[in-house]
Amino acid sequence: MQKKYIKPFSAVLFLIIAVVFLWFYPEEQKKPAYHTNQGKIFGTYYTIRYQAKKDLEKDILARLNAFDGSLSTFNDTSLISRINRNESPTLNEDFLKMYTTAEEVSSLTNGAFDITVAPLVNAWGFGFRKQQQVTGHLIDSLRSFVGYRTISVFDNRLWKTDPRTMLDASAIAKGEGCDVVATCLEDEGCTNYLVDIGGEVVCKGVNAQGETWRVGITKPVDDPAGQQEDIQEIITAPALCMATSGNYRQFYYDNGVRRSHTIDPRTGYPVEHSLLSATVIAESCMKADALATACMVLGTDSALALINSIPHTECYLIYDHADTLCAAQSEGMSRYIVHPCE
């Protein structure tokens, strides 16, 4: 009689042990793991960290490569390269989003940001074509077909008023790339992630330690090799879209004159003022990227006035004063800055 109760008793005992184990099993160990994907795209490096049930690197790379096929001027088959050859391809969603934001920021900044700046960027040696011998006559000639009002979109195609007009989306593409990857992660159900493409960042939620992501603003010291990473400030927020533009890595000297890669589309010349770095927080990383470039064109005072006039947008500007690094920030920027005691 006793034997027939052994199996049921064992089953019940096993069930009790399993329930107790699951009850006391650390909650953290039940959660999906954090993954890190790193690589190179758009001529720069990316790091993507996220919490997910599986590694999403293949999906992310596929999305980034598709995006590269829209806006990379170093990809001969991309939409933007075909437009620069005066072909008339049908524009996709990535290109149209870029164009809409570029047009908005160009209007907000009175042309300080302008994706038609490509001929000038090329002439000064910072673009996708061979540098030219720069003269005042050349700059005046190039400026005659540079200007955001020289292009328009109709019926999903881009139209130019002058066939010599060319586009360069490098000052907005990395930001949009971050947005694109963030959307890809969101579509997979990710709520904790950080996307960093060449220093432009989108992050949300918490890191593997359960803390809100922290992102550094680098001190703008001359560093063409990009090796120095001294931190000026630490930025944090539950959700953040942030981009930085600066003149401390891409520059050269021309007969003793420093030529920075930030070209003012309105004058045709590299900027010459004390602003060294502009970090912008906005509703999208694409918009933050474009606005950061515009700030570098405008200079400290005008940039600060611009950002203070745009809702839900903040900036942190680093400029030189008597060989000393100084900072200026928009009215609401302080809430993002981590103070030493935190």
Image (cartoon, rainbow, N blue to C red):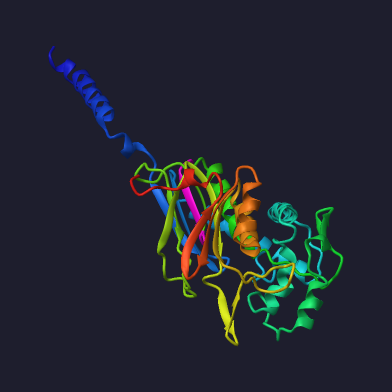
Position above or below: 284 against 160: above
Per the image, is 123 magenta? no
Per the image, is 195 magenta? yes
Range of magenta residues: 191-199
The picture quadrant where one finds residue 87 is: bottom right
Residue 176, visible in the rendered structure: no
Which is nearer the eye, 128 or 74? 128
Which is nearer the eye, 231 or 69? 231
Specify the farthest residue to the top. Answer: 1
Specify the farthest residue to the left. Answer: 2
Position above or below: 27 against 19: below
The residue at 81%/78% (across/down) is 141
The picture quadrant where one finds residue 219 is: bottom left
The residue at 60%/46% (across/down) is 313
Position above or below: 295 against 139: above
* Residue 122 screen position, x and y as percent: 69, 76
Q: Quadrant of the C terminus?
A: top left
Q: Quadrant of the N terminus?
A: top left
Residue 52, visible in the rendered structure: yes
